[in-house]
Image: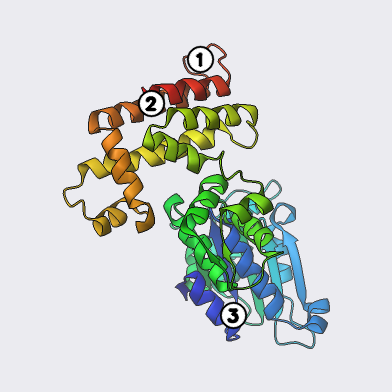
């Protein structure tokens, strides 16, 4: 059949176009859950689900049992739905030998491998869904080829860090809300790229807000607990301006609240910020639109990077990137005689500013 995008799959499901097998795999669990939940709620009505919907877990399955479930015929319905959650733990699917049966290696002939045999000729009345999180099947293997030929394959890839603010804007727009660019960037810098976490926090924001509201930094501070004054976004901004007093205040706040401001996330954001400054120096065309495209940032923030580049010449920015790598290693115990992360952060910020 085909490899499909998320939007294509959602459109098919809403149009009641179902396929006998789905492989939902990849590093971003959010979209895997969304598609799986949509199939679980759409294919059967509430009465049909009682006899025709099964949710099983990969760690508990053996290939013969899985095939036996898939080969059941629906009762008083057009389909039966079988959802295999945590399918990355289903050894037969992932091409790993079962603990109990040497015949379940993927490279066995199809007639000796019940799972491959079924995937090569799946029952049209069964909707079988494999949810493989944080892993992908080997595309060279017989199992993957059978899934691709006779079913639907969807790979959910991790969103890039620079795309998260835009993703937040789009998600809120679908719910009839707007968000200020600074607020979207603040959320993205604080929450990272885990979309399930991002959605949970976005939904918190909306509980007490009226549709049409523009989410600003003060609403985020009240509802999520991200300080509008002491956060990684403001720390990067202070560093860009070489505002020693403000940067020091924020560093002291981070040191006092290490669980809310882990060093690994802070140094990642420093690296992202100064990498963009380094890239700006290398640009020939420094027009605002080109800078926004090259740095992959909202045009709203271009002026900040232009000013930061004035404070950090190319050679100094290169030195900062090297220092960030050094302190990343120190945080992992390399050339570090027990210096706490809070003190490492203070040292690092001092070296950036001086």
Q: Is residue 164 above or below residue 122?
A: above
Q: Position of residue 82 (x, y in %)?
A: 70, 70
Q: Which mark is residue 336?
A: 1
State which tag comes first along the sequence, 3 or 2: 3
Q: Is residue 122 above or below residue 164?
A: below
State which tag comes first along the sequence, 2 or 1: 1
Q: Position of residue 327 (x, y in %)?
A: 45, 24
Helix, strand, or loop for circle 1?
Answer: loop
Identify the residue shown where x is 58% and y is 78%. Answer: 19
* Left or right of residue 125: residue 341: left
Is disc 3 surrounded by few (<14), some (14 to 19) or many (20+) residues within 10 Å? some
Residue 18 visible from this viewpoint: no
Q: Which mark is residue 353?
A: 2
State which tag comes first along the sequence, 1 or 3: 3
Q: Which residue is mark 3?
A: 13
Frontmost residue, 330 versus 314: 314
* Left or right of residue 354: residue 52: right
Frontmost residue, 346 versus 9: 346
**Labelled pair 2, 1 in contact (Cβ < 8 Å):** no
């Amino acid at each position: 059949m085909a490899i499909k995008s998320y939007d294509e799959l959602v459109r098919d499901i809403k149009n009641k176009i179902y396929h006998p097998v789905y492989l939902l795999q990849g590093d971003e669990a959010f979209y895997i859950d969304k598609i799986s939940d949509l199939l679980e709620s759409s294919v059967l009505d509430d009465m049909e689900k009682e006899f025709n919907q099964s949710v099983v877990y990969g760690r508990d399955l053996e290939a013969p049992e899985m095939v036996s479930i898939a080969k059941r015929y629906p009762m008083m319905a057009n389909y039966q739905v079988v959802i295999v959650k945590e399918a990355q733990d289903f050894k037969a699917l992932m091409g790993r030998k079962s603990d109990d049966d040497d015949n379940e290696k993927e490279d066995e002939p199809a007639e000796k491998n019940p799972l491959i045999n079924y995937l090569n000729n799946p029952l049209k009345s069964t909707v079988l869904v494999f949810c493989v999180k944080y892993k992908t099947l080997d595309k060279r293997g017989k199992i993957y080829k059978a899934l691709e030929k006779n079913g639907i394959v969807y790979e959910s890839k991790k969103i890039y860090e620079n795309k998260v603010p835009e993703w937040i804007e789009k998600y809120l727009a679908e719910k009839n809300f707007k968000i200020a660019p600074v607020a979207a960037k603040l959320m993205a810098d604080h929450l990272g790229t885990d979309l399930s976490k991002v959605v949970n926090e976005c939904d918190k924001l909306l509980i007490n807000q009226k549709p049409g509201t523009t989410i600003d930094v003060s609403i985020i501070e009240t509802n999520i607990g991200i300080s509008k004054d002491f956060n990684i976004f403001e720390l990067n901004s202070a560093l860009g301006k070489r505002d020693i007093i403000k940067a020091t205040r924020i560093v002291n706040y981070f040191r006092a609240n290490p669980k809310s401001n882990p060093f690994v996330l802070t140094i990642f954001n420093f690296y992202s910020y100064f990498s963009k400054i380094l890239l700006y120096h290398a640009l020939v065309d420094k027009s605002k639109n080109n800078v926004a495209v090259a740095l992959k940032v909202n045009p709203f923030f271009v002026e900040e990077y232009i000013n930061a580049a004035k404070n950090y010449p190319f050679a100094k920015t290169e030195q900062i990137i090297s220092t960030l790598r050094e302190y990343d290693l120190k945080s992992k115990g390399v050339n570090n005689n027990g210096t706490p992360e809070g003190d490492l952060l203070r040292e690092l910020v001092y070296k950036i500013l001086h």
